[in-house]
Image (tube, rainbow, N blue to C red):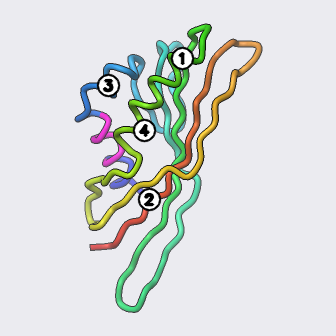
Amino acid sequence: MTPLFTAVYEAYDNDAPLKAALEGGLFLESAPPGTPYPYGTFSLESREPLHMLTETWEAVKLKFAVFSDESSAADVCEVFETLDDVYNAGELAVADYSLVSVLREHDSLEMIRPEGIWRYSARYRIVMKKA
């Protein structure tokens, strides 16, 4: 999954509005302690091979989360929209794969108590054809 993780990070790194919105950065699985807010994480939820005649495809589900310590949910929602603009219904350049498509399946907003941290999470389905 390293090529996919690299592609996710490169999409972040190449998008100035997303880098500005995620002031603390984007991390695989979790952010280091003391990371400034807002920041984002992504993680692998599942990976499923799909064999169709002579072609090999993969369906992958990634979970993204945006965290904010602002008192209002407006900040985390705005940052999430910036992230979603980059990844939802887009295409990722994943090494060794072609026809990579991304589609958001589900999203949710919640307050993590007692810390008072907003978390906006989303699951994306990524379909990739092995080159």
- The nearer-to-camera label among 3 and 1 is 1
In the picture shown, does residue 48 fall above or below 71?
Answer: below
Amino acid, disc 3: Lys
Q: CB of mark 4 within 8 Å of CB of mark 1?
A: no
Q: Nearer the viewer, mark 2 or mark 4?
A: 4
Position above or below: 1 against 22: below
Q: Quadrant of residue 97?
A: bottom left
Q: Position of residue 91 (x, y in %)?
A: 31, 54
Q: CA distance from mark 4 to mark 3?
A: 13 Å
Residue bearing mark 3: 19
Identity of the residue drawn at 44% across and 69% down: 58
Q: Mark 2 and 4 residues: CB-CB less than 8 Å, in contact?
A: no
- Measured as percent of width and height from the top left, residue 62 is found at 51, 50
Question: Circle 3: is it few (<14), some (14-19), or many (20+) Cα within 10 Å?
Answer: some
Q: Amino acid at mark 2?
A: Ile
Q: Amino acid at mark 1?
A: Ala
Q: Earlier in the sequence, mark 4 or mark 3?
A: 3
Element at label 1 = helix
First in sequence, mark 3 or 1: give its number: 3
